[in-house]
Each structure stands twice: as structure tokens, then as C-alpha cells.
Image (cartoon, helix red, strand yellow):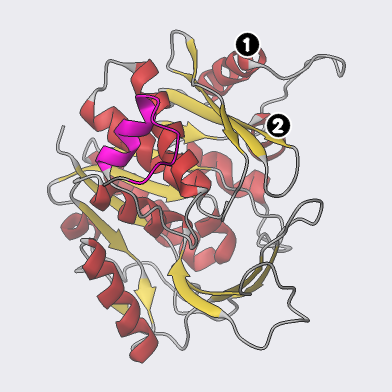
Amino acid sequence: MNKRVITFGEIMLRLATPGYQRFSQTDIFDATFGGGEVNVSVSLANFGISTAYVTRLPDNDIGKSCKEILNKFGVDTGHIILGGDRMGIYYLETGAVARGSKVVYDRANSAFSSLKKGMIDWDEVFKDAGWFHWTGITPAISPGATEVLEEALVKANEMGITVSCDVNYRSKLWKEGNKVEEVMPRLIAKTNVLIGNEFDAEKVLGVPINLPPEVEYSKFTFGFVAKQLMQKYPKLEKVITTRRGTISANYNTWVGIMFDGKQVIESSTYQMTHIVDRVGGGDALMAGLIYGFLTYPDNSQKIIDFAVAASFLKHTISGDVNNVSLEEVEQLMKGNIGGEIDR
């Protein structure tokens, strides 16, 4: 398999309150860029995987600055198209202890949301590609974005490119007239690798769980749900989920579970006692999975262990992207969790 990975989605300007301040307290914001799909590309570039990111940016200084930053990370931006009026923005207030984080979106009429069929040459984009990644955020943005995504999925299937998706359900994004339960199933039908949970299966993808309410979710119940997903969506080959135990906003437990079509595999459980920033944790997991599938496709245990270790490290880093190296993830997998100074 060609190891070049293509991701497609909207990148946004992230404006975060400094420290743990509330929106009403601050008079400054820390500005970075981020988005579910581009976060995956940056992680993969850090791991040495050739990756390209496809999106639409406004033809102004903010859009150009965004491209420059992605180029510094080693992400190919040659297929980014310019146009539209503005870049989407999201505001982040980081929670602490019993107060959860808050996100406010300002992405209406963004350059990406005004995408239309035919704007992107997918034949050219997918030349030499072996993997295509998308998330459920993209079809929630606009009907036009959905149509362009469908173009990409059809072409990827025609070319034999592996397709992955993180359901990433965002209730604030799905608007009346654009129903998630109508849109997502036809897109997942063209997908091979899926991150999602029991809620996604039942409410988004139309697969009833049919488990008694007193039954606790476990890797075994997830295996049952994953098999049902594969029966409804025959192209699915791997289904992955995570279990986050929330003690407080700053202290979580973290474990990954994968059904590889034959067995259910569980990662080590991490105690995340001092979370710096959990935004992008799922994207780091997805990047770790893609790296694992490309690097050691026959070792499901190593794949899920690498992915969860990469995601764990993201929780120690401020910002959307997982700015860690392959060596740092591998050291964590070997049990180096002391956080000592590397001299």
C-alpha cells in the first residue's frame, strides 16, 4: 500500500482564553489553528508519514499564514484552494476540576462551508495516495461540503484507497434540514476504518444496541456493537472506540478498544492526572491508528497501543495539534511515564 495520507476538512482559527480563565474574565485570546482532519495530518507528518491536507481557505493574510504554518509542520498544502470570505473561528474556554470546557463556534459563511462540487480535482489529489481520512464534522458544515466529500469518497473507492472516519458527532453543527441520521450512513457505507461509540452506532448510524440498560459497556459489548456495524456497512474492516473515565476536568482515565474483524483488543489504561488540553485527543488517536495500520498492519495490539499512547501525550500539550515525535510515543509505550528531564 502507498503510505501517502490525504485528509479533508475545515481548519479554523482557535481563540482560547489563557490559563483557565472564563470568557467573561479575559481581554486577550491565544490564537492558533486547528481542525479534526488537519490535526491528523500534522501528527502523521511528525511521525514521518507523507501527508497532504485538502481544504478551502480565504485568500487573505490569515489564510496564507495558516498555509505557512502547515508547511512548517511538513504537511503538503499544494491542494488547498483559495476563495470565499472568511475562516471559521472557534472560541475555547478551558475547564478545571468540576467545571468543563466550553466551545463556541463562529463558522457560518466560512470559505469551507461555501464549497461546491467540482472545485477540487480528486483525481489529482489522490495520485500516489493510499489512505483518505475524513470526519463527521465535514458533512455537518454544509450541504456543499457534503457533496464535495461524497465526490472524494466515490473516487477513493474507485481507486482502492483505504478510507477512515472519526464520527466526531457535534450536535451544535447539525442544522435543521441537514439530518445526521440521513447523511452519515451513506458516507460510512464508503468507509473502511471507523472511530465511534455505542451512541454513534445507535443515534447516528442506525444500528440499535439492544443491550439491557443494566449492562455496563465493556470491550465485549463494544465487540457486539462493532459486529453489527460491520454487518450493516460491509466495507468496514476495523472499528475503534475509546473509554474516558472523568474524575474531573483535569483528571481522566483513557483506554482504547478495537475490533479488527476477528477479535476485540484493548490498550493499556492511562491515568491522565494533570490534563493540559484535551482538544485534539481523538485526532491524535486517529493519527496513531493510521500510522499503526500503515507500519505494522498485522499487529492489532501494537496498533491500538501506539494510538492510545500518542493520544495520551496530546493531553499534555496546549493547542489542537499533537506536536510529539515518533520516538516520544515509542518511549511511552515502553513504560517511560516518569516525565523526567531528558538530558
Along the horizontal axis of the image, is 150 left or right of 94? left
Residue at image mark 1: 220
Q: In the image, what residue type sits under mark 2?
A: Glu
Along the horizontal axis of the image, is 13 left or right of 331? right
Looking at this view, name the residue that lies furthest to the right: 214
Q: Does residue 299 appear anywhere in the picture? A: yes
Q: Disc 1 or disc 2, which is closer to the eye?
A: 1
Q: Position of residue 301 (x, y in %)?
A: 39, 16
Q: In the image, what residue type sits under mark 1?
A: Phe
Along the horizontal axis of the image, is 246 left or right of 168? right
Residue drawn at x 47%, y 34% is: 194
Magenta highlight on residue 334: yes
Does 114 sit above or below residue 238?
Answer: below
Query: Looking at the rendered structure, which numbered label has been put on residue 287?
Result: none
Disc 2 is placed on an element classified as helix
Q: Does residue 191 appear anywhere in the picture? A: no
Q: Quadrant of the N terminus?
A: top left
Tell me which segment is drawn in magenta. Answer: 326-341
Disc 1 residue crowd, few under 14, some 14–19, many 20+, Cα 10 Å: some
Does 61 sit above or below residue 315?
Answer: below
Q: Position of residue 290 (x, y in %)?
A: 33, 36
Residue drawn at x 42%, y 61% is: 9
Residue drawn at x 61%, y 86% is: 28
Magenta highlight on residue 242: no
Cα–Cα span, label 1 and label 2: 17 Å
User: Dividing the picture into quarters, in which one does residue 3 lie?
Assistant: top left
Residue at image mark 2: 202
Disc 1 is placed on an element classified as helix
Q: Position of residue 208 (x, y in %)?
A: 72, 24
Residue drawn at x 38%, y 32% is: 332
Disc 2 residue crowd, few under 14, some 14–19, many 20+, Cα 10 Å: some
